[in-house]
Image (tube, rainbow, N blue to C red):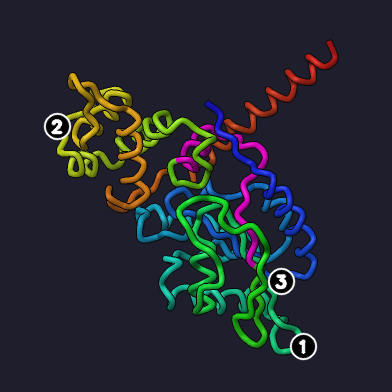
Amino acid sequence: MAIQWFPGHMHTTRKAIADRLPEIDVVIELLDARLPGSSTNPLLAELTAGKPALKVLNKQDLADPEISELWLAHYQALPGTRSLVLDASTTAPARALIAVCRALAPHRGGMVKPVRVLICGIPNVGKSTLVNTLNGQRTAKTGDEPGITKLEQKILLANDFFLFDTPGMLWPRILTAQGGYNLAASGGIGRNAYDEEEVAMALLARVRHRYADRLVARYKLADFSAMTDEALLAEVGRKRGGLLPGGRVNMQKAAEVALNDFRSGAWGRVTLETPDEFAHWRAAGIVAEETRKAKKEARGKA
């Protein structure tokens, strides 16, 4: 299944970002620390090329710290880029963003040349929570559904520091199938764009090999190494109140349990991808996309 989700307001967001960029000094991209690669917007990379960048791995309290270190090193190695991890609701680390942004724009500062920062990211990655934490008040709406913020907001964080908050934005075509599953599992894609059972099985397929002990502890499972992903999902439903009359498993209920447990951190600190894994998926996705375009062009000429 190819997961795609690009509501109409995201076209408006894309144009607003492009129009705003000429006057921006630093671009903050907020990423989900559990899926940094999958939550990186390639469209933003095109739009913001050449701008100093700060990659922020949010929800770090839900992510595997060892893999987060790999991602931090990956981003730190990129030119003109800094990276850090944080929990958007925690004030002290969040305020450290301002100092990093000032370091990335050393020639800006003061009332005459205030630092102008654009913050962007995919839907439901925690931008609004971070903005509220930085600002010390509830200026941005928050929620557990993607697409809450619809309009750009300009916020004064210091006398010479402006933050432009933009609505969450995906990209028109998700090239990596696994990246689409990871985004859906995290809640970054609208529910109407995917099948929850399929996403839950893909999620369990990613988690079972690296964090099998977490699943055993959460659902009181016996050895499930020989089970298919579908059978494992059924066992999750069986253990968590998903039984129908006659002992059948409500697979939709099982999927909801698995996805909610991942999103809430009930499995502990879990990360779905390493930099090397995502690079492999991306390379395969690019090849598949080029093949698709070539076939489409060939059909057009026939």
Question: Residue beneath label 3, please?
Answer: 25
Inspect the image, locate mark 3, and give the three-letter code of the amino acid beneath it.
Asp
Identify whether 35 is placed above or below 251.
below
Q: Is residue 302 above or below residue 228?
A: above
Q: Residues within 10 Å of mark 2 (few under 14, many from 20)?
A: few
Q: Could you say where residue 18 lies in the image, as x and y percent from the top left?
A: 77, 57
> Which percent across, then down, holds residue 266?
27, 50
Q: Residue furthest right?
A: 301
Separation of residues labelled 1 and 2 (CA atoms): 65 Å
Q: Name the residue beneath numbered marker 2.
A: 222
Judged from the image, the secondary structure of the residue bearing numbered disc 1 is loop
Question: Which quarter of the figure is the C terminus placed in?
Answer: top right
The numbered disc on residue 69 is: none
Pick whichever of labels 1 and 2 is earlier in the sequence.
1
Reading the image, the residue beneath label 1 is: 112
In this orientation, does residue 56 appear? no
Task: Look at the image and give the residue range highlighted in magenta.
Answer: 165-184
